[in-house]
Amino acid sequence: MKRRETGILGEKLAREFLEKRGYRILEANYRCSEGEIDLIAKHWDCLVFVEVKTRRSLEFGSPEESITAAKKERLKAVAYHYQQSHSDLPPSWRIDVVAIELGRRGKPSRIEIIENAIGEA
């Protein structure tokens, strides 16, 4: 499985995982001048920006460990941009990470949501 295929599969798995937990997906692969974010959803009265990280192996660390400080700053910038360019959004928001580890044949061995993984500070 190639890197891009892994990413596409991870986003599909994350979307299904979140929808089963009551998230309503608003957008996928939102892009702007600040960068890109995988999913934007609404969960209860909260706007949720979701970064999906998928790994086929833990050789280079867990999925969530791959989010650098620079990536965190870009995600926050994308979230701010989205809020500035859209109206009627919930006042509260957060950035979550969905960490996915794939086992044999591309089957998920772990899917975990880390709520508010990237704070405003």
Image (tube, rainbow, N blue to C red):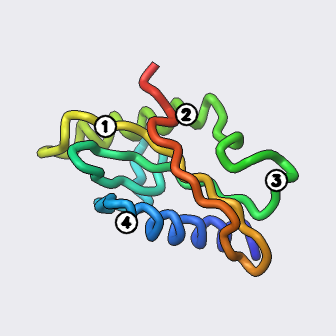
Where does label 3 land, which residue? 58
Distance in Å between CA atoms under marks 2 and 1: 15 Å
Residue found at the far bottom of this picture: 105
User: Cβ–Cβ below 8 Å for labels 2 and 4?
Assistant: no
Of the numbered discs 2 and 3, the one sitting upstream in the chain is 3
Under circle 4, the secondary element is helix
Where does label 1 land, which residue? 93
24 in relation to 47, above or below: below
Under circle 2, the secondary element is helix
Q: Amino acid at mark 1?
A: Trp
Distance in Å between CA atoms under marks 3 and 1: 30 Å
Residue found at the far left of this picture: 88
Distance in Å between CA atoms under marks 2 and 4: 24 Å
Under circle 3, the secondary element is loop
Residue 1 location, quadrant: bottom right
59 in relation to 67, above or below: below
Distance in Å between CA atoms under marks 1 and 4: 18 Å
Which numbered disc covers residue 19?
4
Q: Is 113 positioned to the left or the right of 20 in the image?
A: right
84 in relation to 39, above or below: above
Residue at position x 37%, y 37% from top?
A: 94
Residue at position x 28%, y 52% from top?
A: 42
Where does label 2 land, which residue? 72
Q: Nearer the viewer, mark 2 or mark 4?
A: 4
